[in-house]
Image: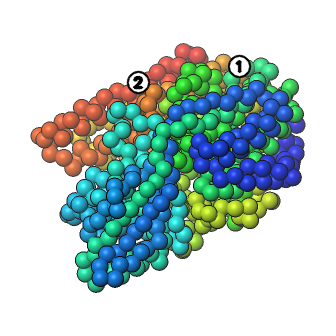
Amino acid sequence: MAESISRAVSGAELDRHLRAIAQYVRLSGTPDEAKAFDYIQEQLERFGYTVTRYESDALIGYPAESRLEILGPEPEVIPSNGYSLSPQTEGDGVVGELVYVGAGLPADYAGRDVRGKIVLSDGLAMPGKTLAAQQAGAIGQIHINDEHIHEMCISPVWGTPTPETADLLPQVPSVSVDRAGGERLKAALEQGPVQVRLMTKPYRAWCKIPTLIADLPGTVEDRFVLFSGHVDSWHYGAMDNGTANATQLEVARLLAERRGELRRGVRLAFWSGHSHGRYAGSSWYADTFWHDLHERCVCHVNIDSVGAKGAEVLDEAPSMAETYGFGREVLRDTVGVDLVYRRISRSSDQSFWGHGIPSLFASLSEQAADPSGTSQALAQLLGSGRRAAGLGWWWHTTEDTLDKIDPDNLVRDAQVYAETLWRLCTTERLPFDFAAAADEIAEAVSGYHEAANGAIDLSRTADEARRLAATLRATPLDQRDPNEVNDLLMDLSRLLIPVNYTRSGPFDHDLALGTVPVPGLAEAAELARLDPTSDEFRFLHAKLVRERNRVEHALRAAHRRVVGAWPEAR
């Protein structure tokens, strides 16, 4: 059966589901989004799943009206578009001098006084750029996209803000322009000082959004695999995320037909608030059902924007070090692709790292890189890769329609997901490699130790990670009882993933500003640049000592767990 499930994927069923969902513009919390959820619920109930539909409060935003004008004797309007969760301007908008700031990253503001000015930057709007402009005192932002204006959420706050993060919500009104508009603004700057007026009137309000959960239990274990994707969309969102939802439904059908062979269950999750609330739906679910997820979820498989025309790069699909080997095996066996390791990025509803849940995939197939501005801009979003360059020029535009989908590519991608879920639900022993995770921690910490240049000693921390990796490799897990091994792997994931993937730990959500391995220790390099007698040095040093304790505690606890189960591994 395991060899045939991928071949059982039906292109006709995928097309039926896609057309049913992509007929709606699915803005978060709107009636048309609810119609798509209705269809998904109806299908899952017909397959025999236990379906629960929740509502939660979320801060939702999306652009409604914007205007950008070059002022002067002959005013000129530049076509523009606003952003999700951007604030509204008062009256006729804000007026200020235009200042070009390159890429708009924090380093680009060094030596520049942009207080009270409107900044112009190259590239897609990203939360880090928004925050940098805000902290520099700008009163407005203009982002130059490629040939197409792409919708974006500019908030760095992951999910619902807390008192500690509410001040980080966007406070500076922002718009995007296409390349032609950007060139016009730059040309005006070459002639001398430029005054512009920027007006935004977005939708930004608290509203109710749906989350749909569908469960199919296993026959042996009371654990489950989480298979998630968002339903909300920019415009018709055929690729993003109609194809993903269609794939979820087709995989759900195939698993339901084979329910008697599932060792552990599958839980399908359909989110709202992904694009318009910075993962509001998945973070609400992560918070509300924290204990159930922490205690029972063996893996999170995410799906986003599959099956597109030209999406030929699958060998850079994202994974964790501990799930990489399994993902590589699935891709090799299913579509003959040799996966390279690409650490999963802080995106795509990855709201479950604090729980310690292993994660695999998100945007499985991407466009090949080329010299175009679109290719370079979209490649920023999903982390660095060798060949992959994002999700197509139509991504987050009005052009994300059914004609951008390749039926053969959609079947191919659905086959990968079907095989992935099948193996995770049926394999006797969970296919995760935590020695690889320990290796990644050791390498990262060693790098931070060197970058600190003696300001803090992290060598012991790296040694703890190496010791754990060596102990795991010396332990013949394949010769042990699978149930005991699964318990061990679950415990290891709960210890190691939070320190390798989060700064804030199990019960909060890091900002949507990207991540690096063992992010809590990444600031060690800053110590080498600070005066050891300064307050800043001492404050940061104290913080890093505490973080070092957190990482070492997790590594030591993981080592004790392995040795406690099998003393001969000592």
Q: Position of residue 46 (x, y in %)?
A: 84, 33
Which label sits on residue 222?
A: 1
Report the residue at 83% width, 29% height from top. Answer: 48
Above-or-below relation of 32 to 337: above
Point out residue 154 in the picture as x, y percentages from the top left corner.
44, 52
| Foreground residue among 219 and 476 | 219
Quadrant of residue 39 in the image? Answer: top right
Is residue 328 in view from this perspective? Answer: no
Q: Which residue is mark 2?
A: 553
**Above or below, 103 relative to 453:** below
Instruction: Residue type at mark 1: give it.
Output: Asp
For the residue pair 188 and 386, the one nearer the viewer reads as 188
Image quadrant containing the N terminus: top right
- Can residue 48 be seen from the camera position used here? yes
In the image shown, does 202 or 373 lie closer to the viewer? 202
Vertical order, 227 against 7 (above or below): above
Earlier in the chain: of badge 1 and badge 2, it is 1
**Side (left or right) of 552 relative to 472:** left
**Left or right: where 289 falls relative to 94:** right
Residue drawn at x 46%, y 36% is 160
The amino acid type, in three-letter code, at marker 2 is His
Q: Looking at the image, how many numbered discs can be counted on the residues? A: 2
Image point 53% across, 47% down: which residue? Answer: 276
Mark 1 and mark 2 in contact? Answer it, CB < 8 Å.
Answer: no
